[in-house]
Amino acid sequence: MRHRSLIAVTAALAAGALTLTACGSRDDKGGNDAGGGDTTVVIGVDAPLTGDLSALGLGIRNSVDLAVRQANEKKYVKGVTFKIEALDDQAQASSGQQNATKLTANKDVLGVVGPLNSSVSESMQKVFDDAKLVQISPANTSPSLSQGPKWATGEKVRTYKSYFRTATTDAIQGPFAAQYLFNKAGKKKVFIIDDKKTYGAGLAGTFKGEFTKLGGAVAGEGHIDPESKDFSAIVTQVKSSGADVVYYGGEYPAAGPLSKQIKASGTTIPLVGGDGIYDKKFVELAGEGATGDLSTSVGAPVESLPSAKEFVANYEKAGFKEPFAAYGGYSYDSAWAIIEGIKAVVDGNGGKLPTDARAKVLDAVQKVSFEGVTGKVSFDEFGDATNKQLTVYKVEGGDWKSVESGTFGG
């Protein structure tokens, strides 16, 4: 996994943000002097740009930057030059809320892509909604963000009109994993672990519901503190449980060491998780014993989609130091959904932005529909992606390999 230079990291930390120019260089103003016109429109980005989850966050940032570059090169919205302002939330809710406040205060910001973490998004949603500023996450999977806290009982309410996502939800991802493990992998007895966070606990819950519905047995359940890398207590429970698989709700910084310690105990059963562990970093942290571990992730493998070939080629050509990672395609599509919304508003207002541009763009994004990198991009009445595809990946030969793609129940 490649990382930014120490100089770039230091600059990002000192500024508290990274603003990327459309030509790829970084400065404290951002932008592209050779853009589409005289009106500057900023697309905000919020993601963990430093810390344990930066491998995912940097891929998000870079992919939005690529979308902005291309919109400017094509002069896609007449009279508009796009810039991005990328802020580092360090996967912390408090930082995310501060970033949301900063972005809404900038009148040039007409849309925001991010964040990565569902728990961070919870702290940002009201800030954006009060400002009528559209937010599109390429990675959030907690159903409550779009469908309200009682979604599991069937009482679905869209609390924040400004919130959208291009990733599908854990209401689908957890059951999809359960169906694969029970019906295809032949796993009948699971030990379930989560990190007690919004994403991890929610994902583990939807997995458990479907796995037991199918007839699977829960050999045990437990929680871990992801900040602690000593998981010996829960590993002992797993070893004595007789489980033939471990399902983990959480992210790769803890999942990797957890898998490694389970295998070191002599318990040679796979660890399975969701999109939060689907990164090469998991494989590195888990070591040789990771072979056979599984994850699900949103969508089909980007590299396998005909619609994504141009994105992959352009990303490589752009010379980013970091991979686009798990959410690159979804971040690119999120940015383009905002760009398409802005174009619709400008085209419908005589070629200019109206004074109430944020509210107009918000309404326009609800109606966008186009073929993106990840497939059809459009949103349902809750702001959720209409694309419900998921993929199962397995660690083989030191990397993730796709095993099966489909939709829940499909």
Image: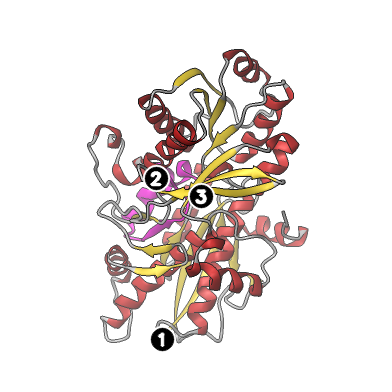
SS label for mark 1? loop
Of the pair 355 and 257, the residue shown nearer to us: 257
Measure the alpha-carbon separation of dots 2 and 3.
13 Å
Residue type pointed to by label 1: Gly
Residue under circle 3?
Answer: 116
Type of the residue with mark 2: Thr
Q: Secondary structure at mark 3?
A: loop
Mark 2 or 3, closer to the camera:
2
User: Residue 153: percent from the left, percent from the top?
Assistant: 25, 32
Sooner in the amino-acid sequence: mark 1 or mark 2: 1
Front-lying residue, 262 or 77? 262
Mark 3 belongs to which amino acid?
Answer: Leu
The disc at residue 202 is none
Lower position in the chain sequence, tag 3 or tag 1: 1
Q: Which residue is mark 2?
A: 169
Give me the C-alpha separation between circle 1 and circle 2. 37 Å
Q: Quadrant of residue 248?
A: top right
- What x and y, as percent, mark residue 24? 63, 74
Q: For mark 3, does the 10 Å Cα neighbourhood hold few (<14), some (14 to 19), or many (20 or more) residues?
A: many
Q: Which residue is mark 1?
A: 79
Label 3 and label 1: CA atoms lie apart by 31 Å
Measured as percent of width and height from the top left, residue 30 is found at 58, 73
Q: Is residue 373 left or right of residue 268?
A: left
Q: Position of residue 367 (x, y in %)?
A: 27, 66
User: Is label 3 or label 1 in front?
Assistant: 3
Please state the extent of the stretch shown in magenta in the rendering. Answer: 116-142
Q: Is residue 26 above or below residue 175?
A: below
Badge 2: few (under 14), some or many (20 or more) residues near its Cα, within 10 Å? many
